[in-house]
Image (cartoon, rainbow, N blue to C red):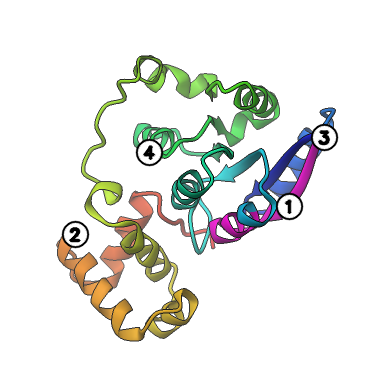
Amino acid sequence: MGTRIILADDHEIVRRGLRAIIEEQPETEIVAEATNGREALEQVGRLRPHIVVMDISMPDLNGLEATRKIKKDYPEVKVIALSMHRKRQFVIDMLKAGVSGYVLKADVSHDLIHALEAALNNRAYLSPQIADVVAEDYVRGTLPEAQENASTVLTARQREILQLIAEGKATKEIALHLKVSVKTIESTRQRIMAKLNIDNTAALVKYAISEGLTTLDY
């Protein structure tokens, strides 16, 4: 039985490229593709793959939040982060979420297979261009404490709702999507704004983008 892999990226052309790279390797099988973190989470629960190649920036539920949920519910599943971001905090957050690798999209053709091999052997892999930023701390097991950001200020549910707000979803739409009441979404939104000391939607969107919860690409 080969290595079972799920690809999670919201761009079809990227998934095609990833598939082409992976399918050249013997004993690998891509069992599913996901266009957002929520789909990836559902597929992991249903298919129990060995590895998920997870884009960080995806709509609905981003890769960081999806990774946290996967590692909590299915700790045996390896996750390799795929991103264009080199920002130190993004790398640290993903490592703390439990990823086995962090690969820059610009280097994916060279680095993805190395990351897959490392994950299967219970080792970590970072693209060389970012390895010098955090590798020493990571190897020592002494990653610096995260600065105050969305991960430390907001709960997982608040971050999830903030992402949907920033992506332009209406309150009722979010409530239906998450299967909660409109009142719950409204009260959560107020708590988010109070915690962040933000009083308008434009500022919420700007904050969500700066924290990597969403992008303007969707």
- In the displayed structure, 125 sits above or below 209; it is above
Cα distance between the residues tagged 4 and 3: 33 Å
Cα distance between the residues tagged 2 and 1: 37 Å
**Could you tell me which residue is drawn at 42 percent across and 39 percent down?**
97
Q: Which residue is mark 3?
A: 1
Label pair 2/1, CB-CB below 8 angstroms: no
Q: Which residue is mark 2?
A: 196
Which label's residue is closer to the chain start, 1 or 3?
Answer: 3
Range drawn in magenta: 28-43
Label pair 1/3, CB-CB below 8 angstroms: no
Helix, strand or loop status at disc 4 = helix
Q: Which residue is mark 4?
A: 93
Q: Which one is in front in this view, the residue at disc 4 or the one at disc 1?
A: 1
Helix, strand or loop status at disc 2 = helix
User: Horizontal and vertical percent for residue 104?
Assistant: 56, 32
Q: Which residue is mark 1?
A: 32
Query: Residue 31 colored magenta?
Result: yes
